[in-house]
Amino acid sequence: MDLNGVLSTIIIVAFVVTVVLAVGSYMLYKMRERRRPRVAFDPAKENIFFERFFPKPTSGQSGQPL
């Protein structure tokens, strides 16, 4: 087998392995999504990731928004 044959085989094998890994990881992601319990939450009242920060007014500020 010449050099072109070896290099094209390496490229094809790398491509196929990449596609197989992508499909496998997507299937695992979907399985994990299906297993996760559904939690109903209201984004207007609660936030999953952050807490709302309300700065305290300093002596020169009234505390009212502009």
Image: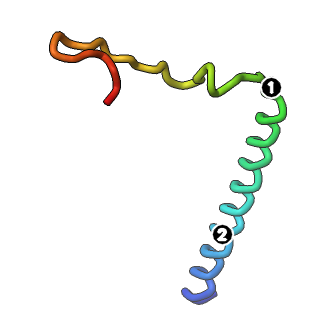
Q: CA distance from mark 1 to mark 2?
A: 36 Å
Q: Is residue 60 above or below residue 5?
A: above
On residue 50, the disc is none
Residue that numbered label 2 is attached to: 15
- Residue type at mark 1? Arg
Question: Image point 63% across, 67% down: which residue?
Answer: 14
For mark 1, give the secondary structure: loop
Residue sitting nearer the eye, 5 or 63: 63
For mark 2, give the secondary structure: helix
Residue 46 position by quadrant: top right
Residue 44 lies, in percent from the top left, at 62, 26
> Badge 1: how crowded within 10 Å, few (<14), some, or many (20+)?
few
Residue 4 position by quadrant: bottom right
Does 10 sit left or right of 24 as displayed?
left
Residue that numbered label 1 is attached to: 38
- Residue type at mark 2? Phe
Residue 18 position by quadrant: bottom right
Residue 55 lies, in percent from the top left, at 32, 17
Q: Is residue 38 above or below residue 8?
A: above
Question: Image point 64% across, 27% down: which residue?
Answer: 43
Specify the color scheme: rainbow
